[in-house]
Structures are given as structure tokens and as C-alpha cells.
Amino acid sequence: MILDMTIHCITFDLDDTLWECWPTIRRAEQTLFTWLQTHYPRITERYNPERLYAHRMTYTKSHPELQHNLTQIRKNWLALLAQEMGYDADMLREEGFHVFWQERNKITFLEGVQSLLVNLKQDYILGAITNGNADVYYMGLGHLFDFAIKAEDAGVAKPDPAIFQLAIDKANVAVEQMLHVGDDPIGDIQGAQAMGMKTVWVNYAQNEWQESHQPDATVHYVTDLDATIRRFS
């Protein structure tokens, strides 16, 4: 029997693969801070944006069991912040998170990405696998993907094999027929390769590869993704 190695499904990481993550998060953090100034002023009287960020990072690092669920981490942190400052924890947890999350999901594709996805969808099953809490359906981009998997829903984060197995199951194709595209050498490339998927390392910053394993292909520009992906077919 001849094994069909043709690529039928392409999965994409989201943050720093299809759009820049840090500008998006920074804007969402500032939106949250401005909202807190109006609705929970005791917090912003004690914490400026830098100290508030440090407070959140300290909380995050103290809860490694929740690293796959950034939504829960942020909600729990907001509740803790409310308790410290004498506010209603449940209210701040839900309202504050919604303010942040709405802004966090206002993304700007890197130039060429949206047309790339539209073109690829004509020939491939497309999926998204993210450790973050960006939601392609909330963004109104669900029509570009056949499925989307968030770490918080999978219960594990990349590079855990289980999140990639979930993608394989949703695609309903052989693992040899799957290609994963992402920017993280460990979470994306090593994680996908461990499951037997082909990989494309998105290296827009043109960093030097530091790992012992190697991606199957590397791209430095969004415009090179289409041709690189199609070489696997």
C-alpha cells in the first residue's frame, strides 16, 4: 500500500503568525487600565500600568497549573485585585475580562495573510491552534477556518501532543497529510513534529534557529507562505 503524503490540512498558530501579538495585547491592556480608572479607581490610584502588569505576571507565574488557560488566569487575577482593593470580585472578574478580551480580539492581519487564507481554503482544510485566547469566530473570521482549537478548551497547551491530536481528529485526515505553520520553535515546530506533522517555521524576525530539531521549511515573509506551503503538495 502506498501512503498518501499529500497535504490535505494546514493548521496555523495565530499570535505572531497571522498577526502581531504584542501590539494587540498592549492596546488591550491600556483599554483595560483606562476602564479601571473610571470604574475601579482605587486600583489605578495604587497601581500604574507598569506595576499592574508586574502584579499580574507575579500572579501568573505562581499558578503554572493554569498556563494553558490564559482566560482563567486573567479572571482569577482580576478577582484577586478586586478583593485587595475592596471591590466586588465577581463583578470585576467578568466585566474587566470582557473589556480586555473584546479589545484583544481586535486584530490586524499581517499584510497578505487574509488573501493567503482565502486562497488556501479553496484547496485545503484549514485549522487554527492557539495557546492564547484569541477567538477567530468572535472576530468574524470563522469562515476562513474549518476548525479552531484554543488551549483552554483542549485542557493543554502546545507543545503537548494532546492539542495536536485534537486537531488531527477534527481534520479527519492522516497525520502525514497535515502541515502546521507557527512561530514558536518548541510549541509549534517541535510539538507538531512529535506527532508526525510537517512544519513551517514562521520567522519574520529572521532569528537564528537554536534547537536541535529542524523545521521542514522556514519563511521570513508572509508573501512566501503560499508557495512554501504548496511545495508540500
Image (spheres, rainbow, N blue to C red):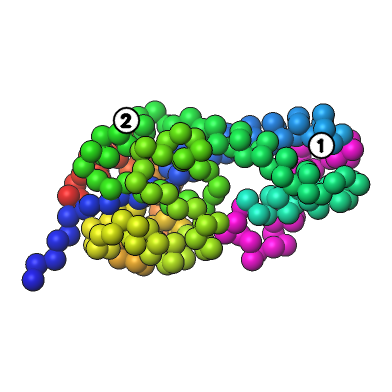
- Examine the rendered structure and indicate whether residue 97 appears above or below residue 30: below
| Viewer can see residue 198 | no
Asked where in the image residue 220 lies, by quadrant, the reply is top left
Secondary structure of the residue carrying numbered label 2: helix
48 within the magenta span: yes
Q: Magenta region: which residues?
A: 42-70
x and y percentages locating residue 3 in the rendered image: 14, 66
**At 36% from the left edge and 43% from the top edge, which residue is drawn?**
145
Q: Nearer the viewer, residue 131 or 139?
A: 139
Residue receiving disc 2: 115
Q: Nearer the viewer, residue 176 or 92?
A: 92
54 within the magenta span: yes
The N terminus - image quarter: bottom left
In this view, the residue farthest toward the bottom is 1
Q: Which mark is residue 48?
A: 1
Amino acid marked by disc 2: Ser
x and y percentages locating residue 15 in the rendered image: 49, 43
- Examine the rendered structure and indicate whether residue 221 appears above or below residue 124: above
| Viewer can see residue 88 | yes
Of label 2 and label 1, which has the lower sequence position?
1
Mark toward the viewer: 2 or 1: 2
**At 65% from the left edge and 64% from the top edge, which residue is drawn?**
64
**At 78% from the left edge and 49% from the top edge, which residue is drawn?**
90
